[in-house]
Image (tube, helix red, strand yellow):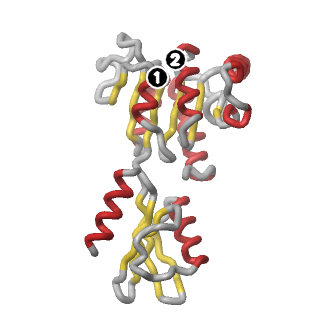
């Protein structure tokens, strides 16, 4: 593998950019293609239809073989890590974290209430006790990031949602009933957010499976989050 190709791969990973490494099986030639169709193509002009197929493979997070007029090409997709940023160190968060871990998410729990966001309640979890808006700005959500607000406290959830809606996070969910969410939307609109942005919030959070317990609510959240990731186009 050429040094320039390795350097481009490292740069893309550091910038948390999705990309694909293309390898022609007949001659071992390799090149890199990013989601924006740029990259080190080794001076080869890639056909538009082939580039579109690779971009779709990146969007679908789907590595595999592609047949082309110039031979078979293995497309190895590289994605930034999946992250779940949770606002609110509540019982639902305790149930949500193990499920999210099983699905491969890197988790950060955010809650300035240190008595709630305690290591004794969330062993082994990365915890931020900053105010949620400050924490989210520092964490810089990307297209592989999901954000859920569970505190049920407008002082925590509303600032977090404002930052989340200004980010490319693929999923934004907020705990609360329809009535609670209607009141929340009114507050956020009055603060200057537009309806198109507010429509990105999944609320009431989770798929409607009749969930009652924290564990069932956690299951519904991860089901909706997965549905959005796989069918909604995270990138």
Based on the displayed image, in which of its 4 quarters is residue 184 positioned? top right
Is there a contact, CB below 8 Å, between mark 2 and mark 1? Answer: yes
Please report the residue visible at 63 percent of the width from the left and 21 percent of the height from the top: 176
Label 1 CA crowd tier, 10 Å (few <14, some 14–19, many 20+): many
| Residue 26: % across, % down | 39, 89
User: In this view of the protein, can residue 182 be seen by the observer?
Assistant: yes
Residue 79 to residue 221: above or below: below
Instruction: Report, in whole angstroms, how far the alpha carbon at label 2 lies from the one at label 1.
Output: 6 Å
Q: Residue at x 72, y 37 (%)?
A: 196
Say which residue appears at 40% left-offset and 48% top-offset.
81
- Image quadrant where residue 116 sits: top left
On screen, residue 86 versus residue 8, left or right, reads right
Reading the image, the residue beneath label 2 is 156
Viewer-side residue, 91 vs 87: 87
Mark carried by residue 13:
none
For mark 2, give the secondary structure.
Answer: helix
Of residue 32 and residue 122, the one placed in the foreground of this image is 32
- Residue at the top extreme, as displayed: 115
Question: Quadrant location of residue 20?
Answer: bottom left
* x and y, in percent, of residue 209 in the image: 65, 34
Q: Which residue is mark 1?
A: 132
């Amino acid at each position: 593998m050429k040094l320039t190709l390795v350097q481009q791969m490292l740069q893309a990973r550091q910038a948390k950019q999705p990309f694909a490494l293309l390898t022609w099986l007949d001659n071992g030639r390799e090149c890199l293609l990013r989601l924006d169709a740029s990259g080190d193509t080794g001076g080869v002009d890639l056909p538009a239809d082939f580039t579109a197929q690779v971009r779709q493979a990146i969007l679908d997070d789907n590595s595999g073989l592609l047949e082309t007029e110039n031979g078979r090409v293995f497309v190895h997709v590289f994605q930034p890590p999946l992250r779940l940023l949770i606002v609110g160190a509540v019982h639902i968060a305790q149930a949500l974290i193990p499920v999210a871990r099983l699905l491969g998410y890197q988790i950060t729990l955010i809650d300035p209430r240190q008595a709630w966001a305690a290591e004794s309640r969330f062993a082994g979890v990365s915890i931020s006790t900053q105010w949620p808006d400050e924490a989210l700005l520092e964490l810089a959500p990307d297209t592989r990031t999901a954000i859920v607000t569970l505190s049920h406290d407008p002082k925590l959830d509303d600032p977090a949602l404002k930052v989340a809606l200004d980010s490319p996070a693929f999923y934004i969910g907020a705990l609360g009933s329809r009535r609670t969410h209607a009141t929340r939307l009114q507050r956020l609109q009055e603060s200057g957010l537009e309806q198109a942005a507010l429509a990105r919030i999944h609320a009431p959070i989770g798929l409607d499976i009749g969930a009652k317990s924290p564990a069932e609510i956690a299951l519904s959240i991860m089901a909706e989050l997965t549905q959005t990731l796989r069918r909604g186009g995270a990138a």
